[in-house]
Amino acid sequence: MTDAKDLQKSFQALGIPKSHATVGLTNLVASTKQYRSLFIHRRLPDCGWSDVQIQSLLFLFSTLDTNNKTLATGSGSSEEEVRWCGVGEREGRVYSSLVAHRHFGLSHGMGRSGDITEPQPKAAGSSVLVKLALHLTLDALRRGGGLDAKGAAAHGILLPLCTGMSMSLLLGSLRSAATAENEKNDDGEPIRKDVVLWSRIDQKSCFKAIHSAGLVCVVVQTKVEGDEVVTDMDAMEAALSEYGERVLAVITTTSCFAPRVPDAVDKVAKLCKASGVYHVINNAYGLQCARTSKLINRACVVGRVDAIVCSTDKNFLVPVGGAIIASPNKKVIGDVGKVYAGRASSSPIVDLFITLLSMGMNGYKRLLKERTTILETFPKKLQEISEKHGERLLSCPANTISFGLTLDGLARPKLDDESEEDYTKSIGKEISSFGAMLFSRCVSGTRVVPRSQLKIMGGESFVGFGSSTSQYPHAYMTAACAIGVSIQEVEEFYVRLDKTLTEFETKKKKKTEEQ
């Protein structure tokens, strides 16, 4: 019955004219060709699929999973009704039909307890979907994101975890691999590799990921060059020398908030290669930036890069909860799959699979192009607004996603009898309130960073938290020109930013006059 000719005969037997059946069956034939092409080429279709085509494929996969076969109910006698008798503790049973529909009947998840990448015997359909999703994602990284198919994006693994937890899992696998090598020092004792050098980036997730993996995080301080906060290579070399054989890995970052700019991953890669330590790049939302991809490709060529961790939601516009780890090294990817404890939810992978098929390569490239088009005017508009209010745009040309503008003028003058510490705390609260004003006016995603803000994480003190350095000379705010943002959104943002700055200045002037 699946053959088009057989279906046409069956339709005619039901009184459907041949001409009518032919018209309808052309859609089926076209869809079948697309499905076949997907399995053969394992790459993103040029044009996105319709929702009907995607749902048809999902339900096809769903029928291959044992939980969607007719189960024994005790009320029937036919062979079909008793085909599958689920007597295990986990049989993909779902009580709510609403939940079952939300997941397209794909309730077995992905992988097995020994390896998240292994096919699941009870879920052939789910296993196929996960494998195809990985191929499509790697294709997007290569042809869309610009990562080298023989280098940075040679191999990969999809994880149903956020970027931070994926980083933690990766570090755990690297530690296990290092332990298995059984290296010994001059005294014949096993070398303890428990230190991770982390080029400072004031985002909590990566710091927590290192601690969650049971490792010691050594924060390598950055330095300020002009307005930019950059990698301090001298400090990195000194840390490698100080901790020596204990260093398991170095973590660098290529997607960050201004004034922080991508780390000099090519220089760090050379250092890691010479020192024989793992090098992990946190590229959470950097796939949308061609310059960043070129930098990572270069790092893989000139030195050592073991893994690149990317978020699925920040790069492909899906709900939070997924990540892809790419690597030039097949073994690194295999080791990550083996350390995941238990079977995993496939929901984030299904979301990604649906989205990539819906986008197609043309749709993904169109989103990237729309971002770069907005990028042509985004910094100029921010500069105009900042100058209107006596501020300026921070000059950070190496960061083409996040942009910062100073907020120094929002601070009140220092009182004669006021200590520097009290003054810094006081104006910090005042400047931070500007961020609250923006949010109350329905502006999300901006970050307001006062000077010398102190944050303590895991017993580590971060002075100047938010700016990724302890000595940044300006209070500032950031806004991102990221994939998916529309021209209508940014134009409305310009208006609301201008109005909010005006309102803040008016309130400040009134308060000063009252004093």
Image: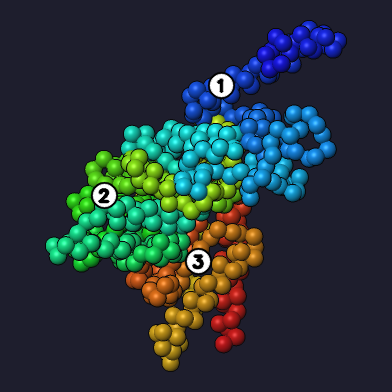
**93 left or right of 306 in image:** right
Quadrant in which the C terminus is drawn: bottom right
Residue 70 percent location from the top left of the image = 73, 35
Q: Amino acid at mark 3?
A: Val
Label of residue 269 in the image: 2
Q: Amino acid at mark 2?
A: Ala
Q: Earlier in the sequence, mark 3 or mark 1?
A: 1
Residue 383 at least partly seen = no
Tell me the residue at 41%/84% (across/down): 421
Q: Mark 3 or 2, which is nearer the eye?
A: 2
Q: Quadrant of residue 216?
A: bottom left
Q: Amino acid at mark 1?
A: Arg
Mark 2, residues whose alpha carbon is within 10 Å: few (<14), some, or many (≥20)? many
**40 left or right of 255 in image:** right
Judging by the rendered image, the residue that carries numbered circle 1 is: 36
Q: Earlier in the sequence, mark 3 or mark 2?
A: 2
Contact (Cβ within 8 Å) of mark 2 with mark 1: no
SS type, badge 2: helix
